[in-house]
Amino acid sequence: MRVELRLGSPSEWIRVFDPRDGTLAVNAAPATAPPMGTAVRVDLICGDGGPRVILRGQVIGHRGTDVALVGLGPTEREKVNYMNGFVRGGLLNLRASRRLPVRLAVTYGGLKGAVSTHTRDINDQGVFVLTEEPLPEDAEVHLIIAIPGRAEPLSVVGRVTHTVVPEDDDVAGMGIVFRTSAADAAELARTIDALEQAFLTGTLPDDTLA
């Protein structure tokens, strides 16, 4: 099931999201809320000039007859973190803290050759890459990342700082910290700035928000 959740202002996020149990209250009016267990895609639009985020989960409860409580899984964690920071304000100006929850095509050198996958999130300092066969921690890796609106893909080298395997209660993959020169770091910051602006204005393709 696909629903649109439009917030008039960022502060309304606090009203619809409950951090205690990770549920999102979605008003289905005038229709009746979907039954328990229904898989839901929520297209969240935050005011004018705010972020557009796609959140996925399933109905785990109801509030009245027309409000569904959607439980969000671990795959949505970075999107929720970004929304929390956006609402609090100031986070977007802290480059070390902002993590854009975007799905970008990425190719890296794996143990058995080139691997094509996607990012879970990215910032100026590093990236989280989705993979069920992460490289060992401290391994150096070369990544080619496709950036919407950029003619050439982003080519960066980084170091694996932490890994998550399928058995863990999280999304499998690896966190990578970029290794860049001062000039490359400045260019990377400009690239992330442009990517974030596109994210905030809702101009990124849907497949980067999935």
Image: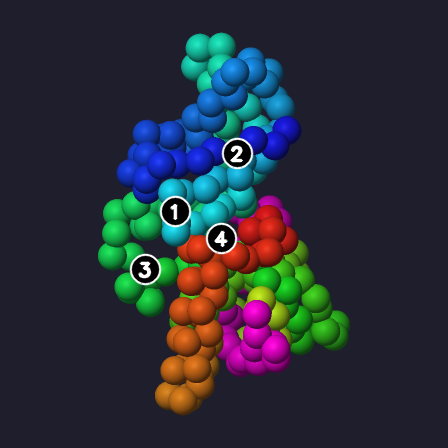
Residue linked to disc 1:
48
Decide: is 42 above or below 181. Answer: above
Residue at the spot 26% in from the left edge and 52% down from the top edge:
89
Residue 124's x, y, as percent? 41, 71
Residue linked to disc 2:
4
Mark sitting earlier along the chain (1/3) = 1
Q: Which residues are magenta?
A: 149-176
Closer to the eye: label 3 or 4: 4
C-alpha span from label 1 to label 3: 17 Å
Circle 4: is it few (<14), some (14-19), or many (20+) Cα within 10 Å? some
SS assignment at label 3: helix
Mark 3 in CB contact with mark 2 (< 8 angstroms): no
Looking at the picture, tell me which residue is in the foreground, 153 or 116.
153
**Residue type, label 2:** Glu
Residue 11's x, y, as percent? 29, 38
C-alpha span from label 3 to label 2: 25 Å
C-alpha span from label 1 to label 2: 15 Å
Residue linked to disc 3:
92
Residue linked to disc 4:
202
SS assignment at label 1: loop
SS assignment at label 4: loop
Q: Is residue 1 left or right of residue 78?
A: right
Circle 3: is it few (<14), some (14-19), or many (20+) Cα within 10 Å? some
